[in-house]
Image: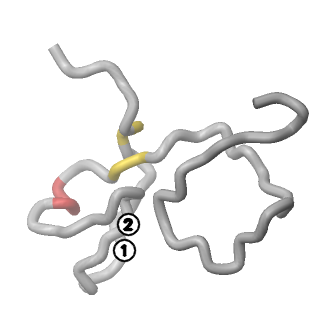
Amino acid sequence: MGQDTIRAIAMDATEGLTRGLEVIDTGNQIQMPTGEAIKGRLFNVVGKAIDGIGDVPTTNGYNIHRKPPR
């Protein structure tokens, strides 16, 4: 929007966020984990496991906004 102002949609919990809070742009997109470790697991919209089994490695994740496979 200009003048160091943005509009955003929260994809996760927002507890503790307030208007005017300083944020840091990581330059990364939302990534979903990939590979054998995700089979049979449940994830939220930001790629975190929500099934209570434990964390999944996210080092080889795919960006959610990428070109489709051919």
Identify the amino acid type marked 1.
Answer: Asp
Label drawn at residue 18:
none
Q: Where 25 sits versus 20, above or below?
A: above
Mark 2 and mark 1: span between their CA atoms?
7 Å
Q: Write down the residue under mark 2.
A: 48
| Residue at the outermost left position | 40
Give whichever of 63, 11 is nearer the camera: 11
Helix, strand or loop status at disc 2: loop
Among numbered discs 2 and 1, the one appearing first in the sequence: 2
Disc tally is: 2
Mark 2 neighbour class, 10 Å CA radius: few under 14, some 14 to 19, many 20 or more: some
| Residue at the outermost top position | 70
Q: Is residue 57 left or right of residue 13?
A: left
Q: Quadrant of residue 22?
A: bottom right
Identify the amino acid type marked 2.
Answer: Lys
Instruction: Tell me if label 2 and label 1 are in contact, CB under 8 Å.
Output: yes
Q: Is residue 59 left or right of residue 4?
A: left
Give whichever of 69, 10 is nearer the camera: 10
Mark 1 neighbour class, 10 Å CA radius: few under 14, some 14 to 19, many 20 or more: few
Task: Specify the quadrant that holds the N terminus.
Answer: top right
The picture places residue 14, in percent across and down from the top left corner, at: 59, 71
Task: Specify the quadrant that holds the C terminus.
Answer: top left
Q: Write down the residue under mark 1.
A: 55
